Image (spheres, rainbow, N blue to C red):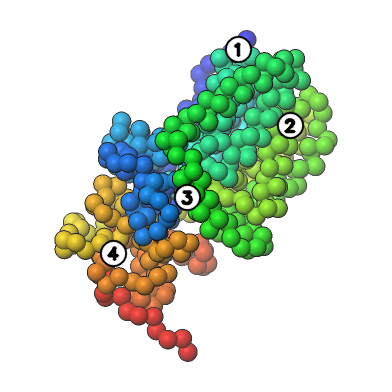
Amino acid sequence: MKPFLTGENPVAKSLPFIFAAVFFTGLGCLGFPRPMMDDLFFTGAGLNLAAGGDFSNPLLARQDFPGTLYFLHPPLHSYAIAGWLKIFGVSTASLLAFQAVMYVLICWSTICILRKHRAPHLLEWLLPLGVASAFLSVGLRSEPLAAALTMLGFALVECLGQKTVLLFCGFLLLFLGASVASRLSFFSAALALASFVRLFLGGTSFIRLGVLAGTALIVAMLGFSCLIGFHFQEFYKIYHFHAAGRLGGDIGSLLGHFFRGILGISQWPLLLLWLVSLPLLYRLSSKTRDLVRASLFVSGVFLLLMLTGIGGEGAIWYVVFSLFALTAAYAQQSSPGRSRLAQMSLAAALLIGNGRSGVELFGLATGHITTETNLQTIPAPASGRPVLINPESARYAFDYRLPKGAIDWNFSAPFPAELATETVLHPDDVYIVGPTVLEVLDREKWLDESVPRWNPLGRARWSFLQHPHWTYVINGKDCLPPKPQN
């Protein structure tokens, strides 16, 4: 009844699932995803809730948002983080494990979808590379949770028949996924629509589908309302204020930021392969229409986001998913040689997409990048002095057991500014920060102290911190004023 989950050799069938779990467990043990600028911005409210506080992010106190509650993003991610930390404890390992579980869920769900459509077995083994290329760079942000819920919901609807409970749960997970990360909500909606269309064309009553999907949407909206305490007006005010400040600028600059800042050069081959593959949407036969439809819907959303300049972190996953779907569909109606060529092309693009992580792993293995710390204990600042930290020190110096009243250095200027150096420095501040902050202070001439880097490829963009776990304690009054430009 469910050949994609069973088979003549259950052990062999389970190996891709086991490999995905081992792959991301190993990366988590090695400290991936690495600290990212937005980590404290996205986890601060969850940390505060886990400590018994309210739904606020005290680390953003100097951003001067119009309200204290964390209504800058949808609430589900923060509450999920808080629940996880209450169960497993507050620590770096716990937060990394949460992300690893999301990566594994994305892999497992997508494997089930591909297996249902009899995709080549190699694609199942390549999926961890696809997930890693899309999400390792986003750190502890909310997009992996959004994609995990979305793909799990899509897999339930696609793979487990038409039982009412399963369809309801599938649509509910799709809508919950849409409620986690605003810019990825369009992809969740696209996959929900693709499932709705497939079921309707397969003979399921439109009224039944409408009732199931509508009820799931109402439940998801009710859950969202409860999490914000039914403070709709305040949520809209703060959320709109933050979104308007983030989306400013012309489309050209927004696209430049997306392709150079968010994606980076290593992910361009995935985009290029996707663009080259798009004509297949019109050539593939009806035998693979379900895969093609899903690929068409998410590809359309990605193009729309690009044209409007609002593409964000994690969106590349749906390009990757589209590539897997198109490769699976193409393999079913092409010669074995062409099928292997398509799979090898995808594998090459995924390897390049993970190139930076691969070089960093090589650096760790060869000792060019160390995991040693430079401070055995962190000196306690004098009472009343504000402490500014960053994601590196939060992880390596405090293990996410943050000092009371701490402020995120990366978001300590009035919004829409961010870094502490984008406003007047406070001489009483104490910076307990990692090397990336020291690099900013050195580059902008507030301090004269460089940070050692390993540059294996001769390009500054692909250089790596030699001592990423080092922590620096800096007094705000010791920062020099910027030197006049000649």
Where's the N terminus, which quadrant? top right
Cα distance in 3D space between marks 3 and 2:
37 Å
Q: Earlier in the sequence, mark 3 or mark 4?
A: 3
Residue count near mark 1 (Cα–Cα under 10 Å), binned few <14, some 14–19, many ≥20? few
- Disc 4 to disc 1: CB gap under 8 Å: no
Residue 293: image tag: 2
Question: How far apart are the alpha carbons under marks 3 and 4?
Answer: 28 Å
- Residue at the image position 26 percent from the left and 54 percent from the top: 405
Residue beneath label 3, please? 238
Residue at image mark 4: 431
Mark 4 and mark 2: Cα distance apart in space:
51 Å
Looking at the picture, tell me which residue is in the foreground, 258 or 225: 225
Query: Mark 1 = which residue?
Result: 163
Q: Amino acid at mark 1?
A: Lys
Residue 111 rendering spot, x and y as whole percentages: 58, 28
Asked if one can make out residue 455 in the rendered structure from this viewpoint, the answer is yes
Q: Secondary structure at mark 3?
A: helix
Q: Is residue 89 left or right of residue 236?
A: left
Q: Residues within 10 Å of mark 3 (few under 14, many from 20)?
A: many
Dot 4: element: strand
Q: Amino acid at mark 4?
A: Tyr
Residue 63's label in the rendered image is none
